[in-house]
Image: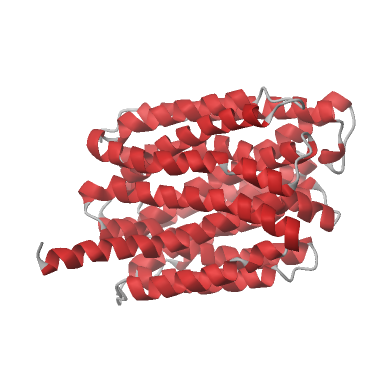
Amino acid sequence: MSTATMSETSRKWWALAAVGSGTFMSTVDGSIVNIALNTIQKTFNASLGQVEWVVLAYLLSIVCLLPTMGRLGDMIGRRRVYLLGFVLFTAGSALSSFSWNIPSLIVFRMIQAVGASMIQSMGMALLVQAFPASERGRALGYNGTIIATGVATGPVLGGLLIGTFGWRSIFYVNVPLGLLALTISWLALADDAKRNEQKFDVVGAMTLGASLIAILVALTEGQHLGFDVPWVIALFVAGIIGLIGFVRWERQHPAPMIDMGSFGVPAFSLGLMTTMIAFTGLQFNFILLPFFLQNVLHYTPQQTGLMMIISPLAIMVMSSISGRLSDRFGPRWVTPVGILSLGFGLYEMSSLTAASTQFDIIIRVVFIGIGFGFFQSPNNSSIMGSLPRERSGVTSGMLNVTRTIGQITGITLAGAIWSSQVTSITGQVFKDITTAPTAALVEGYHVALLVAAGIAWSALIPAIWPRERR
């Protein structure tokens, strides 16, 4: 093997190490926080709706900033944006550990989210930049394995930390992880800083961010206050008008933040739609299962953490396999298999009861993990390969936007359906839904997971839709 070839091979694997370190850190953080929600709720004597905002504020901030950061990376250099993301994420984590109430925790989580949006928007773009097109599915499969490893590590580490040192310790862990990831990325990634004569689309970025915030806040608050509240309706209307204005602005802007012509590429637009729908269904399980385990089956945080790693372990195994299959047979033939398995696992979760055993839960979440592992890498590969490489920052940003919108929608729908079902069954409105009778919690969980399965299976429509450009 020649020196040049050795250099090229070394470069792409170092890029995977750098991107993997950021991916691992951000996924550990997300899964740890989910495990801690029940403990945080009790610490601050908060309602389910209030504690949901610890996750929602983080996700809302990310979804509004991802396209902006993706465009910024394409303009000034992806490495520069990526490194700054680590600095902000680590600082936000340290501040979160000192939170004195729910509002302060939410503010510090938003600082984390600014850094996370930089990391997430650049991650897959840096991988696509480093690996040849023939190995793109393989590279994204490895990245999917790292994601699953982080998700699997989070609950175990979170359960151990919460049980031993309290919930604040889950944010301490991000400080050494962040410094390590920053060091690896600083040494491993080639300097791609550049000067771009194009002006950044400030108006487009602000319009898109404000519109998304308006719609998603209305969606999340509407479930608690009612969707007929005047200011909730006003936010919906303002958000929709803002999105229409954004599209019109981008069409006439000489250097748009998002090229609207990209949505005319079926592999891009249908892939994004598949991502959003599948993540919406998946999020039902991630947000409700910890509450079910701790409030219905009376598991400790440590036991809950151990049960929550089963699905990520299955994802870890299947992501690399599905990435290789995608390179060989094409994403369109692999993705539907994953969606079918994901929906089946969610459907089976709806049959859990207060007498369910650990084996009952494990066998179901394994199907969810296998399905999601089969779905994610091929679908991501299809999306990232659908547009030119010079637009990979925006492409990666949009992929993460749709994923995050799916997560937010899933959290909102899961909480709304579970709460409404418990209220309907008991004829009583609970300030803290987890204090409701066990039978009502179980029945509400059944309905929520049936809805989740239906949503997941509906992702088959865009997944198998013909993708030839018309």
Rendering coords of residue 128 (x, y %): 30, 56
Q: Quadrant of the N terminus?
A: bottom left
Against 302, residue 292 (above or below) is above
Quarter of image, res 130 = bottom left
User: Is 404 or 28 nearer to us in this picture?
Assistant: 28
In this figure, which colouring scheme has been used for the structure?
secondary structure
User: How many numbered discs, if any?
Assistant: 0
The residue closer to the viewer here, 70 or 364, is: 364
Residue 400: % across, % down:
46, 51
Q: Is residue 343 above or below residue 270?
A: above
Q: Is residue 119 left or right of residue 45?
A: left
- The answer to which quarter of the image holds residue 299 is top right
Q: Is residue 395 visible from the viewing direction of this image? A: yes
- Residue sitting at x 47%, y 41%: 315
On screen, residue 146 above or below 22: above
Image quadrant where residue 465 sits: top left
Side of 360 relative to 13 (left or right): right
Give the residue drawn at x 73%, y 48%. Answer: 301
Lateral position of residue 409 relative to residue 230, left or right: left
Does the rendering let one see residue 234? Answer: no
**Outermost residue toward the right in this view:** 428
Q: Position of residue 387 (x, y in %)?
A: 28, 50
- Closer to the camera, 234 or 189? 189
Q: Quadrant where the C terminus lies?
A: top left
Q: Residue at x 30, y 45 (%)?
A: 137
